[in-house]
Amino acid sequence: MTIEEITDYVTGLGGVLVLRPTEGSEAPEISWGDTFFYYAPDGVVPACQPFATIVTKDYPGDETSGLNRPGSFRVNIAVSKTTFAEAGAATDASLEDTVVAHPLYAAANWLAVVNPGAATDASIREMLREAHDRARARSERRAAE
């Protein structure tokens, strides 16, 4: 899977706002080149965390995935407690094309995949759909309040 394939899949779920900070934007420099997915059918960044991200480099304190290699990236997905528990995720964040517990946000039920490929394609799509559905439901609950 490529970053574009993941982005196309997520945007196809509907109501998704994709942020891709670039040089010169107001976003912190560390985020330039990364991708953040929000459920925001109105096109306004909500006051919450994204439901999924794609990072293209190691962040300070999050170097275990070895993303500073050319062409490497990691997709990160916020899933339910049940999905997280059922994933049986590995804990070695450097494994490629393997569902792993996010090296920093596992306690918040985030799963991750470094350089996803054939082995994780179906799992990633399933997890992204769940994360999107959960973000949509949360947004609808907030709008009804």
Image (spheres, helix red, strand yellow):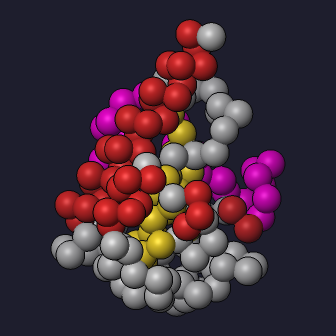
Q: Is residue 138 above or below residue 119?
A: above
State yes or no: residue 98 in magenta: no
Residue 58 location (% of width, % of height): 63, 80
**Within the image, what quadrant is residue 122 found in?**
bottom left
Give me the residue at 42% from left, 45% from top.
Answer: 131
**Within the image, what quadrant is residue 115 found in?**
bottom left
The C terminus: image quadrant: top right
Give me the residue at 45% from left, 69% from top.
Answer: 112
Residue 127 location (% of width, % of height): 34, 53
Inspect this view and state whether residue 82 appears.
yes
Residue 81 location (% of width, % of height): 45, 53
Give me the residue at 55% from left, 67% from top.
Answer: 106
Asked whether, in this view, residue 102 is left or right of residue 79, the answer is: right
Which one is nearer the viewer's eye here, 102 or 119?
102
Residue 95 location (% of width, % of height): 40, 87
Q: Which residues are magenta?
A: 4-29
Which one is nearer the viewer's eye here, 90 or 4?
90
Asked whether, in this view, residue 116 is left or right of residue 28, the answer is: left
